[in-house]
Amino acid sequence: MPRMKFLCDSDRCIECNACVTACKNEHEVPWGINRRRVVTLNDGRPGERSISMACMHCTDAPCAAVCPVSCFYTTADAIVLHDKDLCIGCGYCFYACPFGAPQYPKVGNFGGRGKMDKCTYCAGGPQQDNTGVEYIQYGSNRIAEGKLPLCAEMCSTKALLAGDGDIIASIYKERVQRRGYGSGAWGWRTAYKADVTA
Amino acid sequence: MMRALFAALLALPLLAGGALAQPAPSVRGAISAEEMELQRMLQGGRIEGRVSIPDRQSASLVQPAGKEWRDFHNRTLAWVGGVAVLGILAALAGFLGLKGRIRIAGGASGRTITRFSLLERANHWMVASSFIVLGLTGLNLTFGRHLLLPLLGPETFTAISIAGKYAHNYLAFPFTLGIVVMLVLWVRDNIPNARDIDWLRKGGGFLGLGHPEAARFNAGQKVVFWITVLGGGAVAVSGYVLIFPFAVTDIAGMQLAHMVHGIIAVLMIAAMLAHIYIGSIGMEGAFDAMGSGQVDYNWAKEHHGLWVQDVAKGHRAPPPGDARAYGAD
Amino acid sequence: MLIKRAEAQAARRRLSSTYDGLSAGGFDRRAFLRSAGIGGMGLATLGTLAPGRARASGAATGVLDHARPVTRVKNMCTHCSVGCSVIAEVQEGVWVGQEPAWESPINRGTHCAKGAAVRELVHGDRRLKYPMKLVNGQWQRIGWDTALDEIAAKLGEIRGRAGPDSVFWLGSAKFTNEAAYLYRKLAAFWGTNTVDHQARICHSTTVAGVANTWGYGAQTNSYNDIRNAKTMIIMGGNPAEAHPVSLQHVLSGKEIQRANLIVIDPRFTRTAAHATEYVRLRPGTDIPLIWGMLWHIFQNGWEDREFIRQRVHGMEEIRAEVAKWVPDEVERVTGVPGAQLRRVAQMFATQKPATLIWCMGATQKTVGTANVRAYSILLLATGNVGSAGTGANIFRGHCNVQGATDMGLDVTTTSGYYGLDENAWRHWARVWGVEYEWLLSRFGSKALMEMPGIPTTRWFDAVLMPGEAEKKDSDGQAFVGQPHSLKAMMVFGHGGNTVTRMPEMVKGLEKLELLVVADPHPTTFSMISGRRDGTYLLPICTSFEMDGSRTASNRSLQWGAKVVEPIFESRNDYDVIHALARRLGFADRMFRDIEVKDGTVVAESVLREMNRGLWSIGYTGQSPDRLKLHMANQQHFDLVTLRGKPGTPVAGDYYGLPWPCWGTPEMKHPGTHILYDTSMHVKEGGGTFRARFGVERNGQTLLAEGSYSKGSEIQDGYPEFTVAVLKRLGWFDDLTAAEKASLERHFGANIDRAAWHTDLSGGIIRVAMEHGCVPYGNAKARAVAWNLPDPVPVHREPIYTARPDLMAKYPTLPDRRGFRMPHLGQSVQARSATVAKDFPIILTSGRLVEYEGGGEETRSNKWLAELQQDMFVEINPADAAERGIRDGGWVWVSGPESQARTRVKALVTERVAKGVAFMPFHFGGWMQGEDRRRHYPAGTDPIVLGESVNTVTTYGYDPVTFMQETKVTLCQIRSA
């Protein structure tokens, strides 16, 4: 079985935010919910790097570990999804998530949280694949159509890679060897307890 | 050979990067992502940058503290809560088995004295009832998954948990109000003094070391009062931080608030279990104080002799909210 | 402390009031579906769609229904000039999804933030929905016919009173080629040369500078070809934000070739973050820096002597100027240390092929043309032109700014750079099938017909100043060089906040008798002034809602197919131009050879007419059929050479038939991937420098010496081809009888003067190519352009300079006139000495990745607007600390003219050096602290509004093109 991962090559990422709007476009993500975002480290200084970040679909996902209602599940492709019908919007996954992935619509009392929303790796949710109900709750399901997440597919410089972890790691390693530099895969140590130093 | 050389070359900047005090590399490629993540994880620091969206939280790329919070929530809090709650229940059960119910030594006199006014009682029960719901719904977030979910199934459990979440959020307000009113009503009688030391030394009379003198509130009750006011206050403050996400603090603050909230809450639950015990089945005549507000005269003399004297001498104004105490004959 | 919290809340409230609608259902289709249920009435029930536009329910919700068939339509992104293909999934007339266009050799499936969000443009909740008219300060809905009738009547009335030159026709780089061509034709038939578009304010100086150097004003190579470079300099450009997909090629090249990527910019941009070497220079000192590099190159003999000998004219004069720029002086003026510059110069000259990439940092300057010339000279001196991996890779701005420029939306020329002289007009009269005399009768006079019009950078001055017939003696030079001032402005697809000196522009707007804004969105023009009447808004659809071709920066033409019908009541440019021409009384003439089916102009037939006339730049081989074949076979083109692979339907062709694509479509010229490439046969896309400036000067030949394109029968330089030249060479009889007949029919007795670019049969071109010769001749590039104000580029301090001490040695040009307008240089610069004290910070401006141009379209796109919610100024931490400014706080940025000031947020960052500030130029809707949101027609206000940087930008124009100065002015910043 493939093990789906994201890898952002920060030597390629230019903070063009295509991943962000592609995600919005594909899933009609509402204003204020950012399933994906681009963070720039060392802004304006030598060594500046931008990294596109979303749910990394961790091995031993912290969100799943702390969820009081156990609404998370991991698919056969190792994609971490959750069931919005079970989510109670408590926010625990946000405290535990190392990447700030969980997002909450402000619909609850006192501007509190609604049901959590996060990157689905374009794999929808527990509803039947590519149905209207699934789209309404989770957005589209490209994985079921045999496609990969649109953010990575549309990445302007092909910095953001998505797909089987071994394959994208080898693409990255090949790149690093060819060009002679590479600052590594952000989030991999935290998410997968792995690194891809070539 | 080439590969080894390459690895050595690659390792060099890594070492250099590792030696930097500030992990802000000045040279491209001087420090790898994995290395930086590891360093930050070891230091508990966040990796932060700049984002254009106005959501400050999203500027944090990796926050290793999430792992500590997870450990706290899944291990520390579960253990502390479990041990505290089960421990106190076991201790009380043991005490009850060993000593039985504490009776009024002189028997019921048949005459009563007003111990708590309507306002005091209403306020107490507002706090008590909201606390019970808050406690149960709070415990549900930590233990429900293991205890209730297998029994109820996911849909029912979620329905209950959502109701619990709303209850928890809304009842926070009456609970807080009640704590404030309690403080105003009872702080005068709960200021610790020398007699409390004596009372404590004698174990409050429970241990058969003689019954110590006490005024309106004995040291044990004062402890309960201060646990309620201070603990409740802390739980309330940390709770409001959590109800309004990121209104006053960032993710680190939220995690800290949650830790404070969780730990104090489970300890309070344990303390309040003892309080409930002594106020109900643990001691004859005690419940009436908060039930009808009228306590038996003999019970009052045994446990709060100085207060009874005060009331009798009229040194003391009747409790507020009541026209007049009629226990003073 | 408390005040700041309240402030934060106020800011949140302000935005939340705008985006309330976004998450509450009105705009969020998922939320809407939640409340309405699948298969409900869809968007039509929102009341925003005209009934006729709502297609089948269900799909009209904008959600892909997997149970029903989906059509995939290919068009191109309408934002920058890279030319990314967009694949739209359409279901029952509604654009429901966007898929990566993997097969496009340009973007290979990828997009930037804008491209990945284009679907929202045609959902268009904030689009202009129907024609509107300003009546006593209130917007009123009117019908199309009423609007056009009233506009045409008013135009006619103004024409009768003040002549055709009193109307300013502002076109668009967002037009398709066909629309741009029609618009230029419309202006010609109306009788004026005052027709302009965004190229004036982006790359007009590039076009002038480059064309004056080697012949054509365009990118010499392509985005893809950058993959071949071993050294790249990006100078005055930030493609990571302005052309993100180009970085795919730049970074791949950098990696595969292990190339040097040198970024020279005053600002540490997102591009600079990926550089192997970053050079920070003082804004406005490009020429000293280039001369400083050349000083090292000449000093060390790194120049390409053979290339210079064969193909460059006048390099000795450059040497003389460069000799003055010793490292110390370069460092004094530019701030760049000599050692770094030596390193960069050595890399560029010796690690070849090397390419120079530039954008508006080079062009939007009072010395823009000279900058571009200096850049070109650097390329010539190092032999880095005309081969793979080299060249002037000029990244243009809008999706079709190259095409619109080629179509002559320019006050100095007719379509195809034919110019404005009688020969040009006679050529177009022949192509259009109208009599030259009739065309002449449309203009105010023959002199006005051959005189450049008023450019978009100065139109408001031309409104405010009197014409020659109106002026008084006291006006001095402050008059417009035509009988009457401008009275009316027709704006198609052009933002109103893109030109400097906005406070003056607002005055100009208020004085106009008629203002027509034809655009998908009501632009800043429509709401920034105090106009109360005489203003019309016409809803025009986007290029996704029409067919047509567009030319990417690399000169490749791509055919875009209509994705959906124009939404709401919007119409496409062709039909509006046609409807207007009809009412102005010349539609029958103008559309004589163009097919109009049921009142709808057929885009293909417009392109065919263009193919019949645009010989000069080789827009003749790109028939609609060939372009469509390319779009259908994108996967068969090589990623690096852009050449169609053997055995495919497009074998041998370069992708998009990059111009020049010589001769008729039937000649099957493959297009020209790399200009001036002598290693290729002309029939395979080879070329030479263009013989455009005569054959001899001061006894020196201007023709190439010993250099010629592969397979050329003339193995030396040669002039451009005319019938006379053919006869001299004995090749005249190679022309077919039909070709000869065409020449005789059109030229009669003057047949000898018929040239390759005026021969409507294409015969001269065909014969020249048969003999391996390039139709336009084989000349030397000009290091010295004697027709320009500075034949050899020299450093001139900006008009508003932070270094008044350098003004005496490097003054700007003296006051002069041009483009019918006075042009003050030195007299305004003289103020610098006094204002620099009060305005100590250099202000520069540029792009953000999320927005484009004036920004109305992109700021109305909720997916983009969310990413940049506030106008800001980048300020160095040291400057911020001196002023008590904190990151995210409000500041006033004030400029030295018109007491202008803007209220923006501070972004404290080391991207800018101390003493330099940067502001993006996409914001509008605020004016000097006033939020003017209520002045938009209801429901059409962009989500995000903000101050325009051009409120505080100042006077200053390039002498050759009247390009505005947006990159160097002065400002002061104070905490608000």
Image: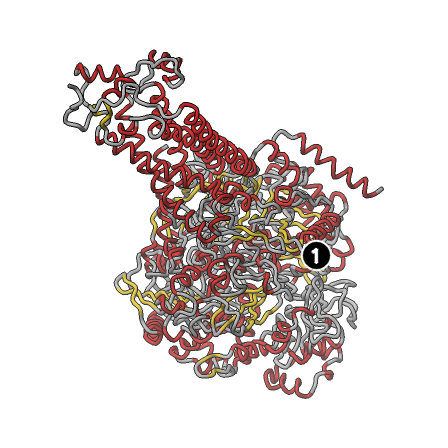
x, y percentage for residue B240? 38, 37
Of C728 and C378, nearer the camera is C378
Q: Which chain does the residue under circle 1 lie in?
A: C
Q: Is residue C843 left or right of residue C695?
A: left
Looking at the figure, which quarter contains the N terminus of chain C?
top left
Residue C676 versus residue C248 in the image, above or below: below
Q: Is residue C314 visible?
A: yes
Q: Is residue C880 left or right of residue C280?
A: left
x, y percentage for residue A2? 67, 56
Q: Residue furthest right?
A: B1
Q: How is the image coloured?
A: secondary structure
Q: Residue furthest front?
A: B107
Please tell me whether mark 1 sits on a helix, a strand or a loop.
helix
Q: Is residue A58 left or right of residue C771?
A: left
Of C216 and A44, nearer the camera is A44
Q: Quadrant of residue B186?
A: top left
Q: Residues within 10 Å of mark 1 (few under 14, many from 20)?
A: many
Residue depicted at 62% across the width and 29% down the height: B21
Q: Quadrant of residue B237?
A: top left
x, y percentage for residue C769? 72, 75
Of C737 and C641, nearer the camera is C641
Residue C20 versus residue A147 in the image, above or below: above
Of C557 and B1, nearer the camera is B1
Residue A62 versus residue C216 in the image, above or below: above
Q: Is residue C825 visible?
A: no
x, y percentage for residue C681? 75, 70
Residue at mark 1: C227
Looking at the figure, which quarter contains the C terminus of chain C?
top left
Mark 1 residue type? Arg
* Tally of numbered discs: 1
